C-alpha cells in the first residue's frame, strides 16, 4: 500500500494494521448471508458424501478464490488493455536479460501451452508491445521481443497491480503465507515442479 504523502510502499506490518483498521470500521456484509460453499458442504454430507466433503469444499473454495482474485487483477489491468496472461508474458520478457525469448521457452516458463503464448503474442503485437524476430543463430526458432512501448506499459501495469492487488490480497500476511505453502504442497504433489 503506497502512502499518499510519500508515494512509498508501506512496510508489511503497517499494511496489516491498515487492513485491520479499515475492516474494523466497516460493517460485516457476510453476517446476513450464508456461505454457498458451506451450504454445498452440508448438502454433500446429507447426500452421503461426507467422506469427500472437505475435498469438495477445498476445490470449490480455490476455484472461487481464483475468480475473485482474477476479477481484481483484470480490473487493475483493464486501463492497459492487458489480460493477466498477456501481463505475465510482458513481465517475463522485461525480466529477461535481453528482452527476448524463444516462444517455446516463454511457454515453458509460463507453464502454458505454446498455442496460448502464440495467441497472447498476436494480441500484444497488434498493440505494438512485442515483436517477433528471427533467432540470431537458429533459423528454425522465432523469438518474441518486448518493445519500448511494451516495457513502459508493463512497468506501469506492475505498479498498478502492486498497489491495487498485491499489497492487499484480502488476508493477513500470515494467512497469505499459509495459503502459499498449502498450494505449493498441492502443486508439488501434482508434479508441477
Image (tube, helix red, strand yellow):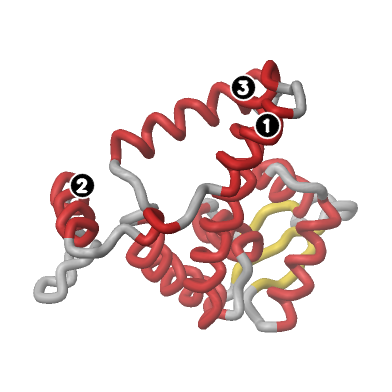
N-terminal of the pair, mark 2 or mark 1, is: 2
N-terminal of the pair, mark 1 or mark 3, is: 1
Q: Residue at x 15, y 75 (%)?
A: 4
Give percent across and percent down for residue 36.
Answer: 59, 48
| Image quadrant in which you'd find residue 74 | bottom right
Mark 1 or 3, which is nearer the eye?
A: 1
Give percent across and percent down for residue 73.
Answer: 51, 64
| For residue 69, side relative to residue 85 (left or right) | left
| Residue matched to label 2 | 12
Total number of numbered discs in the rendering: 3
Disc 1 element: helix
How packed mark 1 is, by other alpha carbons closer than 10 Å (few <14, some 14-19, many 20 or more), is some
Q: Residue 56 carries which label?
A: 1
Q: Which of 154 and 55 is in front in this view?
A: 55
Q: Which mark is residue 67?
A: none
Q: Height in image: 170 above or below 51?
A: below
N-terminal of the pair, mark 2 or mark 3, is: 2
Amino acid at each position: 500500500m503506497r502512502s499518499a504523502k510519500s508515494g512509498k510502499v508501506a512496510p508489511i506490518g503497517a499494511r496489516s494494521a491498515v487492513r485491520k483498521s479499515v475492516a474494523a470500521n466497516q460493517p460485516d456484509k457476510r453476517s446476513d448471508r450464508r456461505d454457498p460453499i458451506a451450504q454445498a458442504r452440508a448438502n454433500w454430507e446429507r447426500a452421503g458424501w461426507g467422506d469427500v466433503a472437505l475435498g469438495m469444499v477445498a476445490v470449490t473454495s480455490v476455484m472461487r478464490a481464483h475468480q475473485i482474485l482474477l476479477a481484481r487483477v483484470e480490473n487493475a489491468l483493464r486501463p492497459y488493455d492487458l489480460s493477466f496472461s498477456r501481463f505475465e508474458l510482458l513481465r517475463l520478457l522485461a525480466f529477461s536479460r535481453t528482452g527476448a525469448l524463444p516462444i517455446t521457452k516463454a511457454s515453458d516458463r509460463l507453464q502454458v501451452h505454446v498455442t496460448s503464448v502464440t495467441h497472447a503474442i498476436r494480441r500484444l503485437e497488434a498493440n505494438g508491445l512485442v515483436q517477433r524476430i528471427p533467432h540470431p543463430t537458429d533459423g528454425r526458432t522465432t523469438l518474441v521481443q518486448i518493445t519500448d512501448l511494451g516495457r513502459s506499459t508493463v512497468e506501469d501495469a506492475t505498479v498498478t497491480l502492486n498497489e491495487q492487488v498485491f499489497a492487499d490480497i484480502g488476508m493477513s500476511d500470515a494467512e497469505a503465507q499459509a495459503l502459499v505453502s498449502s498450494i505449493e504442497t498441492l502443486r508439488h504433489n501434482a508434479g508441477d515442479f
